[in-house]
Image (cartoon, rainbow, N blue to C red):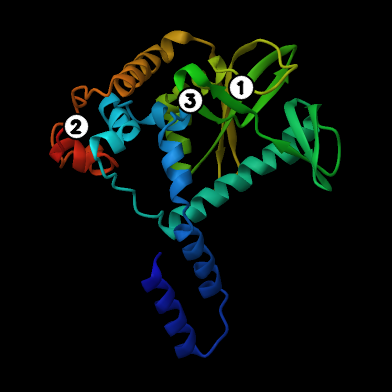
Amino acid sequence: MSLNNLFKMIHNQEETNSPSILPKIEQFYLKKANDRNYDVIMEKMTRFHPSSVGYNPVCPRKYSIIMNRDDFGAKLRLADPHKTSLLRVFDHGHMIHDMYQNDILAKAGCLYGKWINKDNQNMVVEGFYPGERWEYKEPRMKWPEKRMSGYVDGIVFIDGKWYVLEIKSSNSNSFKYIKSVSKFPRDYHVKQAMLYCFAPNDLEECGEIEGAIILYVNKETGEEMDFFVKKDMSIIYPILSDIQVAIEAANTKSLPDRLEDCKTPRSKIAKECVACDFCFGGKV
């Protein structure tokens, strides 16, 4: 949805002469979509995120342009704000995460991490669910030498062993495909989970991570399925290697070759890249 949709909603409301809450909801999401902090956006570009590098290939050329944008004289092309319909999807996903973290798995006694007291935000304890009025704080993952950071959905303790937990909500079609056809989690979900398995986190008492449990939830029916993926460095080694090349390129202010799938500004990767204009038209 967009501003045009908001106008249509208001117009329809006037035509029917009946009250509607929909314009107010759309106004909320329009404000949320456009409430962007440039400094925060730029700071995030200097780090690698498990969810993004697991899904999209690491581009050393792009990273060097971002890190050396002032020296190169590169102007970055920021992505358009998210559509309000997509923000709704994100919020629904967050609600599912919250349900499993703060209700189901917390009270099942297997979710481990830090908990924030709802009545005193400065009061934080580490352990299993402390009881009512406490809210789960997703473990912070920081891997300084890889310039990587992110938040893990959870750490669970099952049958005496520790596992990274990733919660993925999906529609029925995607859920059925994974359950009946591939019978294995999405490749990019596995990569993301493995990065969390190997990266340092901010928990003090968590034991050695054995692997990852990827929980899929059908957001239309509530059906669940999960997969265990054993901790395996070979899954993420190519990503870490590409990240190292990117860091070295940024440090030496060099411009590596473009990715194989990004040879023209019309390629899918280029169209979505913040450094595209300089990459194909700039000079160093």
Q: Residue furthest right?
A: 131
Residue that badge 2 annotates: 262
Which amino acid type is shown beneath numbered disc 2?
Cys
Q: Is residue 268 left or right of residue 177?
A: left
Give the residue at x 33% y 48%. 78
Q: Nearer the viewer, residue 121 or 252?
A: 252
Give the residue at x 43% y 28%. 48
Q: Position of residue 147 (x, y in %)?
A: 46, 23
Q: Of callouts 3 and 1, which one flags the residue occurring earlier in the amino acid sequence? A: 3
Give the foreground label among 2 and 1.
2
Q: Quadrant of residue 264?
A: top left
Residue that badge 3 annotates: 148
Q: Of callouts 2 and 1, which one flags the residue occurring earlier in the amino acid sequence? A: 1
Q: Answer few, some or many: residues within 10 Å of disc 3's Cα (few below 14, many 20 plus, some between 14 and 19).
A: some
Which amino acid type is shown beneath numbered disc 1?
Val
Residue that badge 1 annotates: 164
Q: Answer few, some or many: residues within 10 Å of disc 1's Cα (few below 14, many 20 plus, some between 14 and 19).
A: many
Disc 2 secondary structure class: loop
Give the foreground label among 2 and 3.
3
